Image: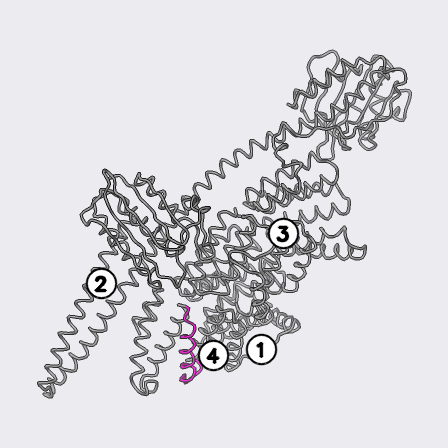
Amino acid sequence: MLAGQKAKMATAYGAAVSYLTIGRVSQCLTENIWEIEYDLTLNLFTEAAEAAYLTGDFNQMEQLAQIVSQQARILSDEAKICEIQILAYAAQNQERKAIKIALIFLKRLGISFPEAPTQEDVELALRKMQVSLSGKSIQSLIDLPIMTNTHKILAMRVMVAIIPAAYHVLPHMMILLVLKQVDLSLEYGNVAESSFSYVFYGVILCGVVFDIESGYQFGQLALDLLKQLDEKAIKASTVFIFRELVMPWKEHVIEVLQPLLENYQTGLDTGVLEYAAYSIHAYCYYSYFIGKPLVTLKAEMAQYSHTITRLKQENILKRNNLFWQVVLNLTEHSNHPCHLTGEVYDEKIQLEQYQQANDKTTIHYLHLNKCILHYLFQEYALALENAEIAERHLEGVTGMFVAAIFHFYDSLTRLAVYPTLSQQEQESVLTKVSANQEKMKQWAFHAHKNFQHKYDLVEAEKARLLSKDGDAREFYDKAIAGAQENEYLNEEALAYELAGQFYLVKGNSKIAQVYLADAHYAYQQWGAMTKVKHLETRYPQFFSKKTARIIEVDATILATRMAPISTTGSSKWLDLNSVTKASQTLSGEIVLSRLLEKMMHLVIENAGAEKGFLLLPQQDNWFIEAKGHIDSDEVAVLQSLDIETSEQIPVKIIHYVARTQESVILHNATQEGNFTKFPYIVKHCPKSVLCTPLINQGQLTGILYLENNLTTGAFTPERLEVLNLLSSQIAISIENSLLYNNLEQKVAERTQELSTAIDHLKTTQSQLVEAEKMASLGGLVAGVAHEINTPIGIGVTAASTLADRTTDTATAYDNKQLKSSALKAYFKMARSGSNLILNNLNRAADLIQSFKQVAVEQSNLDKRSFAVKKYIQDTLISLKPHLKKTSHQITVHGDEQIKINSYPGAFSQIVTNIVMNSVHHAYSKEETGNLRFEVKLDSEHLIIEYSDDGCGISPENLDKIFEPFFTTARNQGGIGLGLHIVFNLVTQKLQGIISVQSEVGVGTTFILNLPL
C-alpha cells in the first residue's frame, strides 16, 4: 500500500492502481481480513478507489466504494469514499446523483437541506449570514480558532466536493451549502476547507448581493487563510474560485489568464484533477471573451481539450469543446457560422444531454454563444430568441464574468430589434436595457477596464435609436477608445462596425467607410475571417477590388445645396474656361495643406473678396483651418482656431449658416439684414459679406466666410455663380483630402501594427514548436515510469517473497524445527527468486540506459557519430507507452554498420513525430498497421524511407501536410505541428530534403535524403 500511496502522491496514478490492486488482492486472500486488519484494509480500499477515479476507471471505483460503504464501522471511515464518489459522478455529468449522495451523508452528520431550495430559502439564509457577520471585520475571521469537531470537519469536506456540481444544476442549493460552510466556520472555527467557503461566499457577494468590495475582501481572506494553514489539498480549488469568479470584478481579465495556467499545474501536482481541468477551461473561454487572437487560441483550445480528455473530466470537456467550435466557426469558412455543429461539437446532441441533467451552466453557455454569433451576423430575431433562453438559465452562471457578457449582448440584441417593435414593446426594451445598464455601470465602477467600453457601446446604440446623434457619436468613439486601450480586440471591431452603420444610415458614406474599414481590419487582427467575409459581402461598395485602393475612392457629386442666387442674364458673362481650370486645380490636389492654400487663393480671386476664411467642424464645434488676404501670397492653414474664442469673424453668422445650411449675402452689412446689431458688425463695420455652406452628399462639410471692406455690393451675381459652381468641387476636394489624410495615417499605423503582429506570430509559432518538442520529451519521461514499472514491480515482489521465506526458514532453524525437505525447497525458491530479481533488474537497467540515451539526445543538439539503425530502434522503445493500446508492428531494416556524424536529438524527434503521425491519422482504433523504416546509403547521402499501410493522404491535403497548424484530427487534440517540426529539422538542422508519396487506401511513404 505504501508504494501505491507514494505513486499517487507523485501523480503516477496508473502505477498507484497497479500497486494498490496487488495489495488489495493479497489482503483478500486472507479470510475475515476486515476484522483482522480493519484499518489497513480500509485505507487500502479507499486509496485504490481514489486511484481508480484519478485514472478514469469509474467502474472499479464504484465497486471499491460499495465494499467500503458496507464494511465501514463509523461515519468518518466513509467520508473519504463519499468525496471520491461525488467527484467521480460529477466528472461523468451525473451531478444530481452526486448531490443526492452528498445530502444523504450530510444528513447522517446532522446537517439537512431542503431537497428543492427556493429563492425565499436563499434570501432568508443570506439575511441570517448578514446578522452572524455583523460587528465582525472580514479580516478578523482569520483569527478564529481551529475547528476540532470531527463531524463538522467531515461535513466541510463533503460540501467542498459537492458545491461545484450544485453550482451547475442547483444554484440555490449551492448558495445554501456555501452559507452553511461559513456558518460552521464562525461557530466551530477555521479548517482548511474554510478558505474554500470564504472565497465562494465572496462569489455570492459579488454576483448575487452586488457587494463587490466585500466579496473581493473575502477572496483575499481565503488566500491568506490558505497560506496560514499551508494545506495543499484545498489550494487548487480555492485559488481557482478566486481567479475565475472574484478577480474579474476588480481587475482586468488579462491578469487572470497566467494564474489560471499555474493553477492547472497545482491541480495536477495535488491530484485535484477536477480543478486542474476547470482552470484550463476557464483560460480558454476568458481568452475568447477578451478578444485574444483566434488563430493562437484555436491551437491552444485543441491542446487543452486533449489534456482535459486525458484527465477524464467529461463534463468540462464538453463545455470546452463548445467554445472551441465557436472559434472554429469564426476562423474557418462556414456556410452556417451560427450553427454550433462541426468538427468538435454537435449542439443538438449535446443540448439533449444538458437538458436531461438540468445543466443550467452549459445550457446558458450554448445559448449565449449562439446569441453572440447571430448578433454578429445580423440575424437579430434569432439572437433575441437565444438571449431569452440564456436568460432563463442565468442562475447557472452566478457570479461569473460570463453573466456580464450576457447583459451586454442582451442589450445590444434588444436594441437591434427595437425598430421592428410596437410602441409598448419598445418601452419594454428600453426598460430592460436600462436595468442591464445599471448593472454594467456598477461593474464598470469597480473594474473600469473590463466593463466601461461595453456600457458606452450600449449607450451609443440607445442614443442612435432615440435620434440623439451627438450623444451617439460621442459614445461610439468612447467605446472604440476604451476597447482599444484595454485590449478587447473583438469588442473594438464591433464598436467600429456599429459606428460605421450609424454614419451610413445618416447618409455620410465617407465617414462610414472609414469606420467600417477599421472594423474590417480589427476583425482580421482578431482572426474572425468568417466575419470579415460577412462584412465584405454586406458592404461591397467599400470592400470590392475596385475600391480597395485609396486613390479610387468614389467622389461622385450627389447633391450640393446653396440658397437660390439670381443669375438672370449673367451666365453669358461667365468665363467657363476659368471655372473649369479652377475646378481641375482643386480636384488634382489631395494633400490637405496644399489644397487649402490653392482653394483660398482661387476663392478670394474669383469671388471678389478682400479676405476669406475656411471653417471645418470638429466634434460639434467650428474651427478656422485656412485664412487668406488679397494682398498676401501666404495662406495660414491647419491652425484649428476655435471660432468661439476668435474675433476675426462674426460667430453669430457662422452659427446661422451651420444651422440652416443656407447662404448669407450682405451687400452692406452695417445697413441691411438681421445682423446689423451683432458685436462683430458693430466693431469692424464690414461692407460686403458672404457666408456659404459647403455641402457634399447632403452633409455639411465646411463653411466659407468672405469679406470685402473696400466696397459695398462686391459679391456680384456673376461672382456668386462662379462661387456656386466651385463650391461643389471645394466640398468634394476637402472631403477626399481629409479621407486621404486619415487613411494615410491609418496605413502608417496599420503597417507598423502588421509588422509587430508578424513578429509576434513568428515568435508564437516558434514557441508552439518548442512546446511540441518539450511535450515529446515529457512523453518520454512518462514512458520511463511506465516501462520500468513492470520489471521493478516483479523484482520487488520476488524480493519480498524471498525475505518472508528467509525469515520463516531462519525461525524454523532457530527452533530446531527445520526439516531437510524444507531447506531444499527454500534453496530452490531462493535460486529461482534470485534469478528473477537479477533478470528483471538487468532488464530495468537496460531500459533506463536506453531511455537515458534518447532523453539526453532529444534535449542535446550536439553532433556526434552514431549507428542509425540502432538509434532508431532505441527511439522506438521510448514510444512503447504511446503504442501500448495499438497492435501496430514496427520494423527497422538496413545495414547495422551505417553510421552518420550528425545530430541524434533531431533524429529522435523526427522518428517520434512521423510514427505518431501514422498512429493518430493513418488507422482507426481497431486496425493493425505495419510501419517500416529502411536505412540505406546512396552515394554521399543517407536515405531513410519510412512507410505505413494506412488510409493514405488525399491529394488536396498532400501539399499542406508540412504547413504549421494543418491537421485533419483537430477533434482528437491534434494541433498540426508534428510534421512541420519534422520538415524544419530535416531541411534546416540536417540540411536535407524530405518528400512524401501517398495513395488513398494504400498508405504513405516519407523519404529523407540527408548528407553524410
Judge the density around disc 2: few (<14), some (14-19), many (≥20) Cα neighbours within 10 Å.
many
Along the horizontal axis of the image, is 905 left or right of 48?
left
**Which of the two residues, 268 or 146, is positioned nearer the viewer here?**
268
Judge the density around disc 4: few (<14), some (14-19), many (≥20) Cα neighbours within 10 Å.
some
What's the residue type where badge 4 is placed?
His
Q: CA distance from mark 4 to mark 1?
A: 16 Å
Q: Earlier in the sequence, mark 3 or mark 2?
A: 3
Residue 124 highlighted magenta (yes or no) = no
Q: Which mark is residue 444?
A: 3
Q: CA distance from mark 3 to mark 1?
A: 36 Å
Can you identify the residue that label 4 sits on?
Answer: 151
What's the residue type where badge 2 is placed?
Ala
Q: Picture quarter containing residue 212?
A: bottom right
What's the residue type where badge 3 is placed?
Ala
- The answer to whether residue 291 is seen in the rendering is no
Q: CA distance from mark 2 to mark 4?
A: 47 Å
Q: Picture quarter containing residue 352?
A: bottom right
Q: Nearer the viewer, mark 1 or mark 2?
A: 2
**Which of the two residues, 451 or 124, is positioned nearer the viewer here?**
451
Q: Earlier in the sequence, mark 3 or mark 1?
A: 1
Q: Which mark is residue 113?
A: 1
Q: Secondary structure at mark 3?
A: helix
Q: Position of residue 670 (x, y in %)?
A: 88, 20
Q: Are marks 3 and 4 in contact (CB under 8 Å)?
A: no
Q: Write down the region rendered in magenta.
A: 56-76
Q: Earlier in the sequence, mark 4 or mark 1?
A: 1
Can you identify the residue that label 2 sits on?
Answer: 844
- Residue 990 higher or lower than 54, as above or below: above
- Residue 665 higher or lower than 338, as above or below: above
Q: Earlier in the sequence, mark 3 or mark 4?
A: 4
